[in-house]
Image (spheres, rainbow, N blue to C red):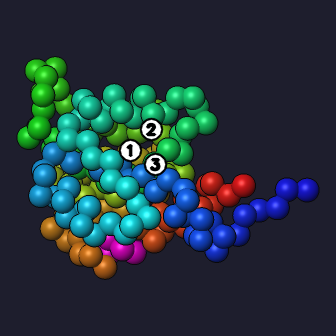
Amino acid sequence: MRCKISRLTALLRIGNMKKIPLLIIEDDPERIRWFEMHMPQDFRAVPVQSAGRAIGLLSRDSFPAKRKHVYGGILMDHDLDMQTVMREEHGFTGSHVIEAIIRYISNEIPVLVHSMNPQKAPGMVNKLNGAGFNVLRLPYADLTPDLFAEWINDLRENWFDLHEE
């Protein structure tokens, strides 16, 4: 009979393991720095600064199908037009990325929608909730280090639940 790895054992082994990847879909370098500055050492930032690149990364990282748990969580903005590289990326937003998240990522992965867009962010949240995702809507202006740490702690627990052997 296989024994489950205890949460304490998993925490003790974190130094030998890869850090928990946190996908940050955000085009503002200052916001990305804030997230990285408040991220604990057992997490690793994976910043993506445009919707087109986020969609490509999500589709690439989800294969094979068992890799739907590749990220511990996702931080999501809506307006992603500051860092587009190719002309084809213009017009893509967080709403387009949501479609890729639903298609390629397990709904067991928590999402924090930190977009300041009062018209579009609620639609993103509703679409993710409708697909069974655990979503927190917290505009960036309202995000504090304590609230972020609380969300991160939930991610960590979820990560270990998903990756118990």
In depth, the one of 11 and 116 nearer the eye is 11
* Residue plotted at (77% across, 62% down): 4
* Label number found at residue 71: 3
* Label number found at residue 127: 1
Q: Farthest residue in the front direction?
A: 16
Kindly identify which residue carries mark 2: 102
Locate residue 32 relative to residue 10 in the image: left or right.
left
Q: How far, Cα to Cα, is label 1 from label 2?
A: 9 Å
SS class, disc 1: helix
Q: In the rendered structure, which amino acid carries the disc numbered 3?
A: Tyr
In depth, the one of 13 and 43 nearer the eye is 13
Badge 3: residue crowd in 10 Å (few <14, some 14–19, many ≥20): many
Asked if 26 appears above or below 43 in the picture, the reply is above
Pointers 2 and 3 in contact (CB under 8 A)? no
Magenta-colored span: 147-151
* Residue plotted at (26% across, 32% down): 53
Instruction: State yes or no: residue 118 in magenta.
Output: no
Q: In the rendered structure, which amino acid carries the disc numbered 1?
A: Lys
Q: Earlier in the sequence, mark 2 or mark 3?
A: 3
Q: Earlier in the sequence, mark 3 or mark 1?
A: 3
Residue 112 picture quarter:
bottom left
